[in-house]
Image (cartoon, helix red, strand yellow):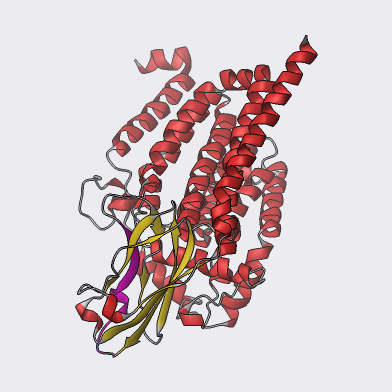
Amino acid sequence: MKLQKKSLKLISLILIIIIEAAISIYTLTGLLRTRETVVFQPDMLDEDNATPYFTLDQGIYTVSVGYEDGGGGDLLLSRSVAEPMPEENTIFSDETKFRPGEDRIAYELYVRFNGTSLRINNNLSEKSGELSLREISLTYLKKRSISYFSLRLLLLWLIIDLLLYCILFKPAGFLAFIRKHRFSILLGAAAIFIAVFPVLQPMLQEGDDFDFHLQRLSALSDSLRHGIFPAKIQSGWLGGSGYAAGALYGDLLMYPAAMLNILGFPLGSCYRAYLIAMTVLCYIIGLFSFGKISGDEKLGAISSAFYTLSLYRLIDVHVRSAMGEYSALSFIPLIILGLHLIYAEKKKGWHYIAWGAFGVVETHLLSSVILIEFIVLFCLIRFKDTFKKETLLELLKAAAASIAVNAFYIAPFLDIYFGENLNGMNGDGVLRSMENNAVYLNSLFIPIDSSDHFVWISLGEGYGVLLLLMLFSLLNGWWERLGPDGRAALV
């Protein structure tokens, strides 16, 4: 009987895979056809420099816009973008700025369905001077289209098949895992959804540093596409002149997102995937770290949810688009866990500090500098525990391991930092920059509805609750330490 049930389950899974294969073949067949290049001349554009609406089938296209710069203005104020019919969400298009010193821009257009109507809109600013268009062409990218849509289907089928396998063949273990960790799973799903909800919209919010980090991702993808690894100096900057972005800014964790772009995914979708992955990682690492510190999974889940949804982190993600900084925040709980184990529980914790340092250094160098200052201060405050043989040994192991796992980044960074003039940011220039741009202590207590420039670093109204909880904890600990006799004498 058991064998018969298992056979039926296996047959059901095979039939589902066959259906998935049939759907994939039907979907991908249309992408194999060769398509003619669509060309628009200047006399075919309307008074707003937009093409008439035309129809394209599902696939990826390169939009190429030729232009002449007559001078007398700022070309970066003008942009070109593909637009669907009003109220439709049938395409995804990069919005590309016209650049001085060049005569052509190109960007990718993703068409989701066959028979999609769209147009190319060139928003030419009056402040761009004598800018004129020559022609607009759209070229179908067959290999890239097949790669992209195949990978999308493959990921979808993998998720469905994995869930079906767990339900059909491992129902007891799967359900037992869900029941055991249901609080952490449900709270985590809610916290992650709230944290990433703005980027689930069709259009990405362009924060302060959005263009810079999207360019980092684009240049890294371009370098990998040309076989350059590691991509420390990338040619996709400054009109092909190149920039050492990979050497000065840790980007090791961006490689998977760059690979997605190579496989055909839009640059915006790659950034979105990276942001969601970092948010999920932030909650998981927080759950593990805070749960281990408290000894209670539910407390760990609650702490991690608060950390994931902290005001500072959300502003980093959605207002500032501080890709490096919000990535580094995902790994800080590991460092806190390591210090807790070493100092509070007298256990080995150096490996947690090392892996936390790996994540922080490989995403945001400035965060690692701040963390080093914090750790040194913490060690000095706890000097009685710090200068014990066991503690010193753990700290030395943590420091050595942190340097070792980050050597991939540290070596080229130091080579360029001490070997080149980085726009006055070497030596004393760094100290002057820190002095001129440092924030004030009272900035931590600015109300979140304030118009103050430093409101983004404020703890918000929650700082009052936090201080009251800290005060209660300190007074409670002091009261307990007094003992019955001490309390009676005080009263």
Q: Residue 364 at x, y = what percent?
A: 51, 59
- Judge from the rendering whether residue 183 lies leftward or rightward of residue 464; answer left or right: right
- Examine the rendered structure and indicate whether residue 465 appears above or below residue 386: above
What are the residue bounds of the magenta stretch?
Answer: 71-84
Res 462 quadrant in image: top left
Camera-side residue of 467 and 32: 32
Camera-side residue of 430 and 33: 33
Whether residue 390 appears in magenta in the rendering, the answer is: no
Instruction: Residue at 40%, 73% (x, y): give it.
Output: 432
Note whether residue 436 is visible.
yes
- Examine the rendered structure and indicate whether residue 404 appears above or below residue 294: below
Camera-side residue of 437 and 63: 63
Instruction: Residue at 34%, 60% (x, y): give it.
Output: 118
Q: Residue 177 at x, y = what percent?
A: 62, 22
- Judge from the rendering whether residue 29 lies leftward or rightward of residue 266; answer left or right: right
- Examine the rendered structure and indicate whether residue 233 appears above or below residue 340: below
The quadrant of the picture occupied by the C terminus is top left
Camera-side residue of 107 and 224: 107
Q: Residue 213 at x, y = what percent?
A: 45, 63
Res 130 quadrant in image: bottom left
- Judge from the rendering whether residue 76 lies leftward or rightward of residue 432; answer left or right: left
Instruction: Residue at 62%, 35% (x, y): give it.
Output: 19
Looking at the rendered structure, the number of numbered marks drawn on it comes to 0
